[in-house]
Amino acid sequence: MGFFNHGRTIGSRARNKARARKRALGVLLVAAAVLVLLDLTLPPRITSRIIARPLIQFYRVGPGRLWTHHCPSRPSCSAYALAAFEKHGLAIGALLTADRLMAEQGRMAEGPWVRVQGRKYVDDPLQANTFWWSP
Amino acid sequence: MNRWFCLPVILAVLGGGAGAGAQERGDLEARIQGFISQGETRKAEEALSAPDQDQTLPLETREKAYYLLGVVYLERLEFGPAALAFEQIRPQAGPGLKAAFLARECRKAGEIRRDSPFLAGFLSFLLPGLGQLYLHRTTDAAWAAGLSLTPAAIAALGWRAGSWLVCAPAGLVSLIFYGGAVYNAVNQAHKGNRRRLEELRDRLLIQAQALPGEP
């Protein structure tokens, strides 16, 4: 009896795991599809106002203030992300933001630099990273 | 550095060459002047290279225009057309020495190292950070690998534990950074190529300035 009970417990755990995995895949696919659909149907200005701007504002008033590390680039990463989302939409804006986050430390040694209130920053505007875009 | 300040010089040179009586020459000069000031270098070049049996435009004015046209091409990092423009100038002309030097060096521009954006992107597609390593950007490679593989690892742990609340958001973040790593590699390859060409251009213009002869 105990053996059968034990077997049933393991079986239900495995089923729960499988269900959770399916749900994870489903949520991931649905979220990606919704983002891409929103990106394709609505103009970038609106999608950025609905989704990106609140997230970035939250970052600015919340976790962003806790960092002792200051962004070495101008415009700052959050301003850059906001501009990227507003100009190019959610998908490409997200890629541009990820690119900026990866490259900001490496670019410090290369320049070009700009001085803002006596501090030296890397001058890295959005236009410098969109080689494929000609307005 | 913007060197469009040379445009007033172009206008002055071309304007100065205009004779009082030669209406045709004035028209041609004005047309070329207009093309160059509007950045329409191809049209300016066509007007300059058109057969000129009547000698409406003096050779000196023509050569000075070619020199400035070459500088405008150089500004745009178009080394091939710049070399062609500089090669139109005779060695004994005013800017002949500078033009010969610039033409020779512009021809060498093809020899400078160029990274393939496609290869960099493909390597980062295979493994985030690999494309950055190909570009000799180790800091970027570490960030690219860390930012895309850490959420991927968290998503995998969530998958194993059967927790969709962990797996789905971490998977989404991982996908974004994975795409970002590929874009970063392509973008850095483009930027590196452009930076090397800009350095070459600045060096050439400084070296040409030091040579004798009026531009």
Image: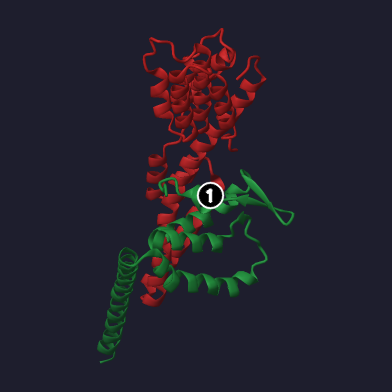
Rendered-image quadrant of the N terminus of chain B: top right
Chain B's colour is: red
Residue labelled with disc 1? B140
Residue placed furthest toward the top: B92
Question: Disc 1: which chain?
Answer: B
- Residue B176: x and y, percent? 41, 61
- Residue B153: x and y, percent? 43, 64
Q: Is residue B14 above or below residue B39?
A: above
Rendered-image quadrant of the C terminus of chain B: top right
| Residue type of the residue flagged with mark 1 | Asp
Tell me which residue sits at (43%, 65%) in the image: B173
- Residue B168: x and y, percent? 37, 71
Chain A's colour is: green
Mark 1: secondary structure: helix
- Residue B8: x and y, percent? 58, 31
Tell me which residue sits at (45%, 58%) in the image: B148
